[in-house]
């Protein structure tokens, strides 16, 4: 049984979908969860955790604002004395064929999905190194491993997270800080609900397990990598995709 009692965990993009599921599951396993999202949207997630008997607080955070990211981490450390888990989950899509993609569509996706992880990871490293323990989990995507037409910006950002995590894992392993990646496949979220049904059926036909994943499938993987049971795992990519990419 995964026990995260006494751990302080910061989850970005925690207002819905995979981020919300991760926040709920970390709290259910005993962590105090700081649910972060834009414009106070994470308040409902924190309230849900508290109503279920868990410990949580909400943080308003635009992950594209590097200074704000540092401020959220500093506040958490000042208030709780430590930070044990960072989940870089916040992400967006701006799909377009490359010939039609404008620079703003590229820049916004890279800033939200990749540069934000840089800012938050950099902010948590000092307290984690000081306490000589920490777990950092980046949420990538099967698209970051296999690519996908019309998603060059998204694929680049998610592939970048993998290289980023592997590099940082080597830098901080001696301090007992692990850095890993979870790469979801086709998951039932607001983002995938926008996919046309015929396209969704085509995608599902390529999945050996013959179903879409759930946000909780991803949440359990993140919980494992955040736990003591995963203490000897770092710099790895855990693909949770039903076998659609092997």
Image (cartoon, rainbow, N blue to C red):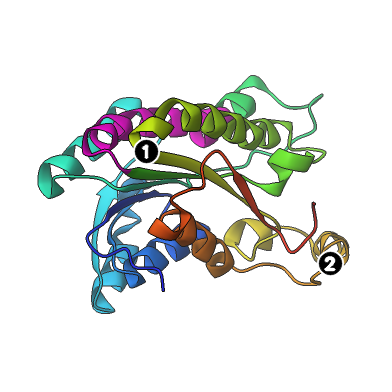
Outermost residue toward the bottom in this view: 52
Instruction: Say if the magenta span includes residue 80.
Output: no
Name the chief secondary structure element in magenta.
helix
Q: Is residue 131 visible?
A: yes
Left/right placement of residue 73 relative to residue 178 reads left
The location of residue 159, given as percent across then percent down, is: 66, 34
Q: Is residue 109 visible?
A: no
Q: Residue at x 24, y 77 (%)?
A: 53
Q: Residue at x 37, y 34 (%)?
A: 120
Q: Residue at x 32, y 65 (%)?
A: 44
Instruction: Say if the magenta span includes residue 122.
Output: yes
Quadrant where the image shows the N terminus:
bottom left
The location of residue 132, given as percent across then percent down, is: 27, 38
The location of residue 65, given as percent across then percent down, is: 36, 29
Local crowd size for mark 2, using a 10 Å CA cut-off: few (<14), some (14–19), many (≥20): few
Which stretch appears magenta? 110-133
Q: Nearer the viewer, residue 173 or 115?
A: 173
- State the separation of the CA atoms marked 1 and 2: 37 Å
Left/right placement of residue 137 relative to residue 198 reads left
Q: Nearer the viewer, residue 82 or 15?
A: 82
Identify the element where label 2 is drawn. Answer: loop
Whichever of labels 1 and 2 marks the residue nearer the N terminus, that label is 1
Picture quarter containing residue 66? top left
Q: Which residue is mark 2?
A: 208
Identify the element where label 1 is drawn. Answer: loop
Mark on residue 62?
Answer: 1
């Amino acid at each position: 049984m995964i026990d995260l009692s006494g751990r302080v965990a910061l989850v970005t993009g925690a207002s819905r979908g995979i981020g919300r599921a991760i926040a709920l599951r970390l709290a259910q396993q005993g962590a105090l969860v700081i649910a972060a999202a834009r414009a106070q949207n994470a308040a409902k997630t924190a309230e849900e955790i508290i109503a279920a008997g868990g410990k949580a607080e909400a943080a308003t955070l635009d992950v594209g604002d590097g200074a704000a990211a540092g401020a959220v981490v500093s506040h958490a450390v000042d208030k709780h004395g430590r930070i044990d888990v960072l989940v870089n989950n916040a992400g967006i899509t701006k799909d377009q064929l490359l010939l039609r993609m404008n620079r703003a569509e590229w820049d916004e996706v890279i800033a939200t999905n990749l540069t934000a992880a840089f800012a938050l990871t950099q902010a948590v490293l000092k307290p984690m190194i000081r306490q000589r323990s920490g777990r950092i989990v980046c949420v990538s995507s099967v698209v970051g491993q296999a690519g996908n037409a019309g998603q060059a910006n998204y694929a680049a950002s998610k592939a970048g997270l993998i290289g980023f995590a592997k590099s940082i894992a080597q830098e901080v392993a001696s301090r007992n800080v692990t850095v890993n990646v979870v790469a979801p496949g086709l998951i039932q979220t607001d983002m995938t609900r926008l996919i046309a049904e015929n396209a969704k059926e085509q995608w599902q036909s390529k999945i050996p397990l013959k179903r879409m994943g759930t946000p909780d499938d991803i949440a359990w993987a993140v919980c494992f990598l955040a736990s003591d049971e995963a203490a000897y795992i770092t710099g790895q990519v855990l693909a949770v995709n039903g076998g659609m990419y092997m």
